[in-house]
Image: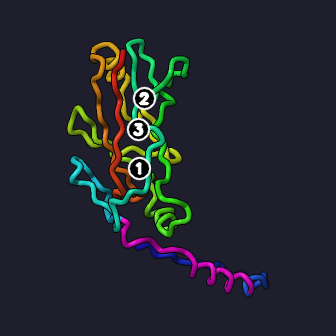
């Protein structure tokens, strides 16, 4: 728990202190002092089982805008079910965007639209290794460049057979590192 100390330097030449002190006292009453859910130490997750979930979770808070990507033999990335003529995605800008699954009219929307219940991080569970990596989201978005290395991308383009699919799992986490829900997306090779 954080403790807030208020130090007021009194200057007898300024009569405003009589007005400011009560205002600052009232303002301090509205300051939140932390959360029981706030970890004492940083959460270190080497396996999926090491990721603790926040109270009331896992819960279906988010959907993915697009949950499947394809890479052709020319190295162009697209959303799955793309049509000829659709623009390809650059690895630097291709992203997994989170959309709220809870309707705004639902009381659960307010419960999960606050700091301790919003996704700020994602634990990436890699399909080819046992590696777990915590990655920061950017405005509810996870960029694929933060998940897929250039070497793996090149390997998918040059060595993978058509139809081979990698399934990545993400455990979305709040600002304190506690899990909210698990979601998945795929990357497939096509010809």
**Mark 1 to mark 3 CA distance (whole Å):** 17 Å
Is disc 1 surrounded by few (<14), some (14 to 19) or many (20+) residues within 10 Å?
many
Q: In the image, is residue 33 part of the stretch drawn in magenta? A: yes
Q: Provide the secondary structure element on which disc 3 rests.
A: loop
Q: How much space separates mark 1 and mark 2, taking CA atoms? A: 25 Å
Q: Residue 80 carries which label?
A: 2
Residue 34 painted magenta: yes
Indicate which label's residue lies in the foreground, 1 or 3: 3
Tell me the quarter of the image containing the C terminus.
Answer: top left
Q: Where is residue 37 in the image (x, y as percent from the top left)?
A: 36, 68
At horizontal 44% and vertical 52% (from top left) the residue drawn is: 62
Foreground residue among 94 and 11: 94
Q: Read off the residue under disc 3.
A: 67
- Residue picked out by circle 1: 121
* Residue at 23%, 32% in the rendered image: 128
Circles 2 and 3: CB atoms closer than 8 Å: no
Give the structural element (helix, strand or loop) at label 2: loop
| CA gap, disc 2 and disc 3 | 8 Å
- Given residues 64 and 148, the one toward you in this image is 64
Residue 155 in the image: x percent, y percent? 31, 18
Instruction: Pick the quarter of the image with the N terminus.
Output: bottom left
Residue in the picture at 74% in, 85% down: 19
Image height of 129 relative to 132, above or below: above
Camera-nearest label, 1 or 2 = 2
> In the image, 95: left or right of 56?
right
- Relative to 165, is 158 above or below? above
Left or right, 38 with respect to 21, comes to left
Residue 145 lies left or right of residue 106; in this view the side is left
So how many labels did they put on this image? 3
**Labels 1 and 3: the sequence-earlier one:** 3
> Which residues fall within the magenta stretch?
19-38
Count residues near mark 2 (Cα–Cα under 10 Å), then give few for <14, some for 14-19, many for 20+: some
């Amino acid at each position: 728990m954080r403790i807030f100390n208020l130090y007021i330097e009194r200057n007898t030449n300024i009569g405003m202190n009589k007005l400011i002190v009560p205002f600052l006292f009232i303002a301090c009453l509205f300051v939140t002092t932390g959360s029981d859910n706030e970890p004492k130490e940083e959460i270190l997750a080497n396996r999926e089982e090491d990721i603790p979930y926040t109270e009331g979770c896992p819960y279906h808070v988010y959907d993915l805008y697009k949950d499947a990507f394809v890479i052709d033999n020319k190295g162009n990335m697209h959303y799955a079910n793309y049509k000829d003529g659709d623009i390809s995605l650059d690895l630097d800008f291709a992203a997994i965007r989170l959309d709220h699954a809870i309707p705004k009219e639902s009381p659960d929307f307010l419960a999960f639209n606050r700091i301790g219940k919003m996704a700020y991080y994602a634990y990436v569970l890699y399909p080819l290794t046992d590696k777990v990596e915590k990655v920061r989201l950017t405005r509810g978005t996870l960029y694929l460049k933060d998940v897929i290395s250039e070497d793996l991308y090149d390997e998918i383009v040059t060595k993978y057979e058509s139809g081979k699919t990698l399934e990545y799992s993400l455990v979305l986490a709040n600002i304190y590192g506690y899990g909210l829900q698990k979601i998945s997306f795929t990357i497939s090779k096509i010809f």
